[in-house]
Image (cartoon, rainbow, N blue to C red):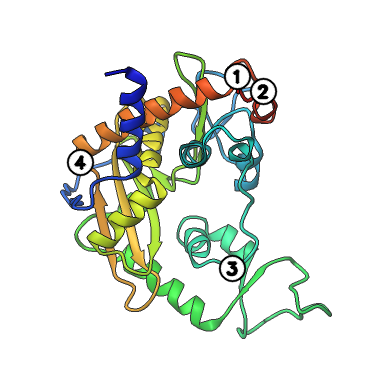
């Protein structure tokens, strides 16, 4: 059996876990270290790039940086192969999406205030002649705002795991950049993390076990999970747990929480490494940016 064939099969297993895949919820209310216990550079970026550093920056800046590769690029590569189009950075969402709005409301309240406005509320500013907000914000209906608040409250009031404390204590939307031993340069931006646990927020019309398993297969969520675990381990020196927080985007906005088991993370990690090997083999590893790599795709 060739190693290349084994790598391909491992990558397919992570992208397409078995249909009968059972998600688990094995929680322990473990104490987390204070933020000061994280890597010393958690709020700063050195002038000279090191093996691993973090940066507090807008999402647009993170997406525009092409000298490090994200899990989104890797998953597009897994679906499409060595096409230069997989290297195109995803744009910052322009239109109202309940997922992005919930991320902002729960994780980045300041960004929510800067980017979104509830139409019909007291103090509503006038729109310009085109009906747009002069400040460039996305206008949300009163019903949408009510749904967002219900989803946020459901997450914060969840009783089977200490989500509220984890969210309060964790680092939120922090960009992590690192270089591995073979010289590969990667980046990740977990929703919320500490040295012990990563929380990944997902919205879904149906967050039940079987339906969420389909989303994991379709979108390669477990590859993203392994990528984020590697990022946090590089930054903190510790292997964190990985927890999906899935919230129903329609009433009654039920919250389901899934923690990946050690075996699930191990399989995802193996598949991720196989995918990275294929990516490096498809694009010139000497390139200094993804833009250069797009022009140097191997035939």
Name the mark nearer the viewer: 1 or 3: 1
What kind of element bears circle 3?
loop
Q: Measuring 37% from the left and 69% from the top, which residue is drawn there?
A: 205
Q: Residues within 10 Å of mark 1 (few under 14, many from 20)?
A: some
Of 183 and 174, nearer the camera is: 183
N-term mark: 3 or 4 = 3
Q: Which residue is mark 4?
A: 261
Checking the image for residue 296, the label placed there is: 2
Q: Are marks 1 and 2 in contact (CB under 8 Å)?
A: yes
Checking the image for residue 284, the label placed there is: 1
x then y, percent, for residue 5: 34, 24
Q: Measuring 29% from the left and 38% from the top, which residue is drawn there?
A: 13
Q: Are marks 1 and 4 in contact (CB under 8 Å)?
A: no
N-term mark: 1 or 4 = 4
Alpha-carbon span between mark 3 and mark 4: 34 Å
Q: Which residue is mark 3?
A: 96
């Amino acid at each position: 059996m060739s190693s290349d064939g084994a790598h391909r099969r491992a990558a397919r297993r992570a992208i397409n876990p078995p249909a009968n895949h059972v998600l688990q919820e094995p929680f322990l209310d473990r104490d987390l270290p204070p933020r000061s216990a994280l890597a010393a550079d958690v709020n700063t970026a050195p002038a000279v790039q090191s093996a691993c550093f973090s940066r507090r920056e807008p999402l647009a800046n993170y997406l525009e940086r092409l000298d490090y590769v994200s899990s989104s690029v890797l998953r597009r590569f897994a679906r499409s192969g060595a096409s230069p189009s997989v290297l195109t950075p995803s744009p910052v969402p322009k239109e109202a999406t309940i997922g992005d709005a919930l991320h902002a409301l729960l994780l980045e309240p300041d960004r929510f205030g800067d980017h979104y406005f509830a139409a019909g509320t007291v103090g509503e500013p006038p729109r310009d002649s085109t009906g747009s907000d002069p400040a460039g914000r996305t206008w949300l209906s009163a019903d949408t705002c009510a749904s967002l608040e219900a989803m946020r409250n459901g997450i914060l009031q969840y009783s089977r795991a200490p989500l509220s404390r984890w969210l309060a204590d964790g680092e939120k939307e922090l960009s992590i950049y690192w270089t591995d031993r073979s010289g590969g340069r990667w980046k990740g931006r977990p929703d919320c993390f500490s040295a012990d646990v990563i929380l990944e927020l997902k919205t879904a019309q149906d967050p039940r076990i079987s339906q969420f398993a389909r989303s994991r297969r379709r979108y390669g969520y477990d590859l993203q999970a392994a990528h984020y675990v590697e990022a946090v381990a590089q930054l903190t020196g510790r292997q964190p747990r990985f927890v999906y927080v899935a919230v129903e985007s329609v009433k009654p906005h039920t919250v389901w929480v899934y923690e990946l088991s050690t075996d699930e993370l191990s399989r995802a990690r193996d598949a991720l490494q196989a995918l990275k090997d294929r990516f490096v083999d498809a694009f010139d590893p000497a390139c200094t940016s993804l833009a250069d790599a797009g022009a140097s795709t191997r035939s």
